[in-house]
Image: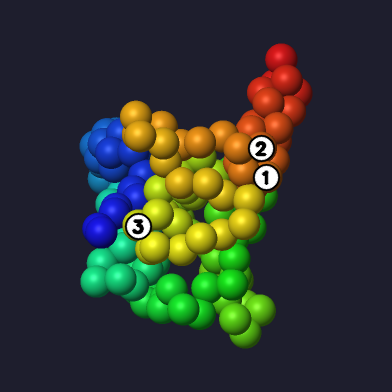
Amino acid sequence: MTARFRYNAALAIAAVVAFCGAIPLATSRWYLAFVLLVPLAVFVWAWRAGADVRDGQLVVRYPFRSRRIDPKSVRGFTVTHRRVSVVLADDSTHWLPAVSGGRLPYLTDALGLHVPGVSGPTEDGAPAATGDAERAADEALADEQHQKR
């Protein structure tokens, strides 16, 4: 099974708009040319970062490098503040860009893993909300939204 996890394309579009908006400032003085690097860096990050499941391997894509992770070395996942990290057999953790707690069942299903506390998607395509990791992510999201009010 193949799966792709990416950030919303609106981030890349916003970076292009910011780049166009920064051109007049950057061309007004030579020492302000570095301002163009900020939207360019955001564009590269938004376009490249993510996680893929290809050929039975988890491929984590960062802006300037990629890392292949064998599913056999995955010990589990941690979910903190809607960010998912994979825990490997050597106790190292690696952040999975563009994978949120709600998308974790799709990732484990694509990798063919059974992780306690995470149940796969249901027949209608929606993730089952019975796992401890998802419940914790939902509670953290609710707390965060409540604090914003």
Figure quadrant of the C terminus: top right
Residue 41 image point, x, y percent: 36, 55
Mark 1 residue type: Asp
Instruction: Using the image as rendered, state which of residue 116 and residue 28 is in the foreground.
Output: 116
Mark 1, residue position: 132
Q: Does residue 131 lie above or below 47 as drawn?
A: above
Closer to the chain start, of discs 1 and 3, is 3
Name the quadrant containing residue 111: bottom left
Looking at the image, which residue sits at the far front? 123
Q: Which residue is mark 3?
A: 110
Q: Given the current orientation, which residue lies at the most extreme bottom position?
A: 90
Residue positioned 35% across, 57% down in the render: 110
- Residue at the location (62% across, 57% down)? 116
Task: Name the foreground residue: 139 vs 148.
Answer: 139
Q: Is residue 76 left or right of residue 55?
A: right
Give whichever of discs 2 and 3 has the lower sequence position: 3
Task: Mark 2 and mark 3 in contact? Answer it, CB < 8 Å.
Answer: no
Q: Quadrant of residue 145?
A: top right
Residue under label 2, please give it: 135
Q: Position of residue 82 (x, y in %)?
A: 59, 43
Residue 40 in view in this figure: no
